Image: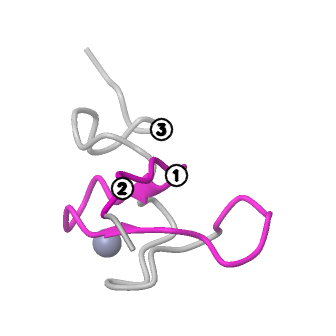
Amino acid sequence: MARIKLVVDGFQCERCSHKWIPRVKRYPVICPSCKSPYWDKPRRNKRKNVQKE
Ligand SMILES: [Zn+2]
C-alpha cells in the first residue's frame, strides 16, 4: 500500500497550540489538551469587557 497524504479538517488551540481532529462533527467547546473554552479565541485582548480609556 502506497503512502498518501490525507488532508482533514482539524483545529488548533490558540492557547496551547494543540492540534487535533474532532471525532464528532460538532464544533469543539473546549480544547482537549488544556480544557480551555477559549481555545479558538486569540490572546490579543485579554479582557474585552474591561476597557476603560
Ligand atoms: Zn489548548
Q: Amino acid at mark 3?
A: Asn
Residue at 50%, 68% (x, y): give it.
Answer: 21
Q: Main secondary structure of the magenta part?
A: loop
Residue 33: quadrant of the picture: bottom left
Dot 1: what SS? loop
> Residue 46 location, x and y as percent?
26, 44
Q: Can you identify the residue that label 2 sits on?
A: 4
Please state the extent of the stretch shown in magenta in the rendering: 3-28
In the rendered view, how is the structure colored? secondary structure
Q: Can you identify the residue that label 3 sits on?
A: 49
Q: Nearer the viewer, residue 53 or 23?
A: 23
Query: Mark 1 against mark 3, which lies toward the viewer?
Result: 1
The residue furthest front is 1
> Residue 10 location, x and y as percent?
48, 55
Which quarter of the rendering shows the C terminus?
top left
Q: How far, Cα to Cα, is label 3 from label 2?
A: 47 Å
Q: Amino acid at mark 2?
A: Ile
